[in-house]
Amino acid sequence: MKPISIIVAIADNLAIGKDNQLLWHIPADLKRFKALTTGHTIVMGKRTFYSLPLRPLPNRRSIVITDVPGEQIPGCDMAYSIEEAVALMDDDKENFIIGGGMVYRQFMPLADKLYLTFVHKDFDADTFYPAIDFKEWTEIQREDISDDGNLGFDYSYFTCERRK
């Protein structure tokens, strides 16, 4: 099995995005994302790729999943199915699934590890994360963050591993 991890920030109402944009700007969470994913393969859908501020993200190998046969994006490895994306992943290093909603949904059964940022607020959204059955996961790390600047909400980092 290839090491597959999901990294995502989720609101209390499971919201993750609207109009192909993130719902919040948490500088510390973006730094955490960069620290965890740098030097690794990141896997995403095409809309997520085009929502990135820098494309492709530096110091990471990008696999972009598209349903357009033969489509190419410079600087990225292309996959035309979830199975093809898995085949392209690293065998011996963590691979990070970074979105969007449909990609997260399809990779949830394959993931070994979750890096979750829970944003403790409800947001208006058009993209949601699938419900997580925490009976399938063991929490291995948690950090609660409150009073982070002028965000207007608290958040928590959770790292979970799938129960064997």
Image (spheres, rainbow, N blue to C red):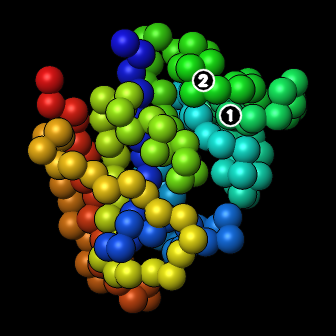
Above or below for 71 versus 134: above
* Left or right: 132 in relation to 123: left
Above or below for 13 versus 112: below
Residue 120, image quadrant: bottom left
Image location (x, y in percent) of residue 85: 60, 23
- Please identify the quadrant where the C terminus is shown: top left
Above or below for 20 versus 122: above
Q: Of the numbered discs in the image, which one, if any, rests on residue 102?
A: none
Q: Which residue is mark 2?
A: 85
CB contact under 8 Å: marks 1 and 2 = yes
Image location (x, y in percent) of residue 77: 73, 24
* Res. 74 visible in picture: yes
Q: Kindly identify the amino acid type of the residue bearing the numbered disc 2.
A: Ala
Q: What residue appears at the point 46 percent right and 45 percent down from the top-left corner?
A: 105
* Left or right: 90 in relation to 49: left
Q: Residues within 10 Å of mark 2 (few under 14, many from 20)?
A: some
Q: Earlier in the sequence, mark 1 or mark 2?
A: 1
Q: Residues within 10 Å of mark 1 (few under 14, many from 20)?
A: many
Q: Mark 1 and mark 2: span between their CA atoms?
A: 7 Å
Q: Secondary structure at mark 1?
A: strand
* Left or right: 19 in relation to 150: right
Q: Which residue is mark 1?
A: 65
Image location (x, y in percent) of residue 144: 21, 67
Q: What residue appears at the point 48 percent right and 45 percent down from the top-left corner?
A: 104
Number of numbered discs overlaid on the protein picture: 2
Q: What residue appears at the point 64 percent right and 26 percent down from the top-left corner?
A: 81
Q: What residue appears at the point 17 percent right and 40 percent down from the top-left corner?
A: 137
Image location (x, y in percent) of residue 76: 76, 29
Q: Secondary structure at mark 2?
A: helix
